[in-house]
Image: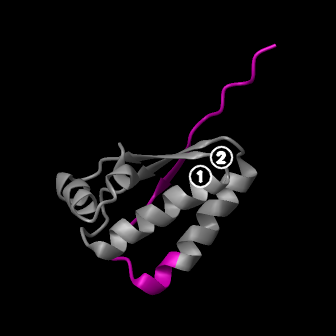
Amino acid sequence: MSKPEMRPVAVTIRGPLQRTDLPGLYKRVCALFTANPGATLVCDVTEVAIDAVAVEALARLQLGARRHRCAVRLLSAPRELIELASFMGLEDVVAA
């Protein structure tokens, strides 16, 4: 018997993000992972400011996903955000 196919969970992250927003964002996303074991979170980052706080937010989402055996896929990640994450040594964080 095959496993039922998991539907992706979609979220949109809007900016500007402040560093103080990150613990709450992490907690909300981990709640989604807990409620949807093994799910892929499709995260629209079109409206995220391209800065170090955004890269840190995405790194935290990836960490939460790994801890819950889930995955994060970015939707509409601006090239500049990918380049900044790569510059910071976090290219895995923005794997689209």
Q: Quadrant of residue 23?
A: bottom right
* x, y percent for residue 36: 70, 46
In the image, 5 versus 66, the foreground residue is 66
Residue segment shown in magenta = 1-22
Q: Is residue 42 left or right of residue 40?
A: left
CA neighbours of label 1 inside 10 A, class few (<14), some (14 to 19), many (20+)? some
The reply to whether residue 85 is visible in this rendering is yes
Q: What amino acid is found at the position of numbered circle 2 in the picture? A: Arg
Percent of width and height locating residue 39: 63, 41
**Snapshot quadrant of residue 18:** bottom left
13 falls in the magenta region: yes
Residue denoted by label 1:
66
Q: Which residue is mark 2?
A: 69
Judging from the image, what secondary structure is the residue with disc 1 in?
A: helix
> Dominant secondary structure of the magenta stretch?
loop
Residue drawn at x 54%, y 60% is: 63
Residue type marked 1:
Arg
